[in-house]
Image (tube, rainbow, N blue to C red):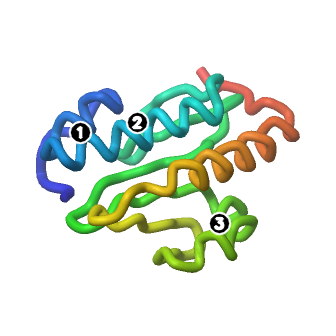
Amino acid sequence: MKTDRAAPESIGDYIAAFPADVQQKLEQLRRAIKAAEPAAEETISYQMPSFSLNGRNLVYFAAFKKHIGLYPAPTGIAEFADDLATYAAGKGTLQFPLAQPLPLELIGRIVRFRANEILAKPAKKKHG
């Protein structure tokens, strides 16, 4: 569903640009990520909603014509390969069809796994 519209300034702006049914799914995803890692910070990166933790990318997500993409880094996919077998996936991407309910519990587990990976590393220093 990407178009030539202006780059969003917040996750709320990004979500508001979609039809109501897609907005509902994006909000569910946003809440599931926040519930799994309350310390995560909402950002926009590469014109997509993202969450960061300790200065590192936690997950990105985006809506498309027929699916919602979740980008938890390759380790987040490899760790849950068996649970994700029914979804289209690539090295660092998952695709959840818009016509199906989001697997929110599984998404929460993936986010917690990624958060634990990040928290096991020293915090990234901010530039500037």
* SS assignment at label 3: helix
* SS assignment at label 2: strand
Marks 1 and 2 in Cβ contact (< 8 Å): yes
Label 1 or label 2, whichever comes before in sequence order: 1
User: Seen in the image, is 1 located left or right of residue 106?
Assistant: left
Q: Which residue is mark 3?
A: 77
Q: The N terminus appears in which quarter of the rendering? A: bottom left
Mark-to-mark CA distance, 3 and 1: 28 Å
Q: Which residue is mark 1?
A: 7
Which residue: 46% across, 33% down? 31
Marks 3 and 2 in Cβ contact (< 8 Å): no
Instruction: Check disc 3 and give the amino acid type.
Output: Ile
Residue 83 in the image, given as x and y percentages of width and height: 64, 70
Residue 60 in the image, given as x and y percentages of width and height: 48, 48
Which residue: 61% across, 45% down? 108
Residue 76 in the image, given as x and y percentages of width and height: 68, 59
